[in-house]
Image (tube, rainbow, N blue to C red):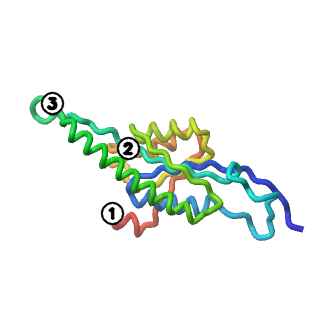
Amino acid sequence: MAEMRRRRKMKVMVAMDDSECSFYALKWALDHVFVTPEMGTVLAEEPSSDEADMVVLVHVQQPFQHYAFPAGPAVYATTSVVESVKKAQEENSTALMSRALQMCRTKPSIKAETLILEGDPKDRICNATEQMQMDLLVVGSRGLGTIKRAFLGSVSDYCAHHAKCPILIVRPPKETTATK
């Protein structure tokens, strides 16, 4: 007789940005982290929506700096420019999360939610994983070299050292990173 077991739901956060690397990481997580039960294994009962695996898609917008310091005095952006930039950021975030949610719909057994935050992506992602008590954080890797990572910083590197849950860094296949 087939083994009967109840498995614990998994709460996974996937960090999203507008790079193909983050979408590859989401696809990889959907295909490899959220696996369906093996043949011959029967769950005690169908999971309810409260017991279904959950993926939280998080996107962190950089705050808009409405001033600049060129070679002279500080230059401030007008209110209409600030509003225009914020609206463009919101539209970009909405389109990005819509695309990610569409990918999640291929797995009907997974409950998907979106979370859009503002601030430094490194800190906000780590704080969100802790506050929401996530079981796993999945981030894509852009494949920065050592020098670029030292100067630009790496969200995946920072999260690997500061997240309060296990982290999975997904590197895209070589042909994806070679074209960038």
Q: Which residue is mark 3?
A: 74
Residue at screen point 37% across, 49% down: 146
Task: Check disc 3 and report its element: helix, strand or loop.
Answer: loop
Q: Quadrant of the N terminus?
A: bottom right
Residue 49, percent across and down?
68, 52
Give x and y (percent) for residue 141.
44, 54
Kind of residue sitting beneath label 2: Gln
Which residue was labeled with disc 1? 180
Mark 2, residue position: 61
Tell how many labels.
Answer: 3
Q: Is tag 1's residue or tag 3's residue first in the polypeptide sequence?
A: 3
Residue at position x 46%, y 54% from top? 140
Mark 3 burial class by Cα count in 10 Å: few <14, some 14-19, many 20+:
few
**Measured Cα–Cα span from mark 2 to mark 3:** 24 Å
Q: Residues within 10 Å of mark 2 (few under 14, many from 20)?
A: some
Q: Secondary structure at mark 2?
A: strand
Q: Are marks 1 and 2 in contact (CB under 8 Å)?
A: no
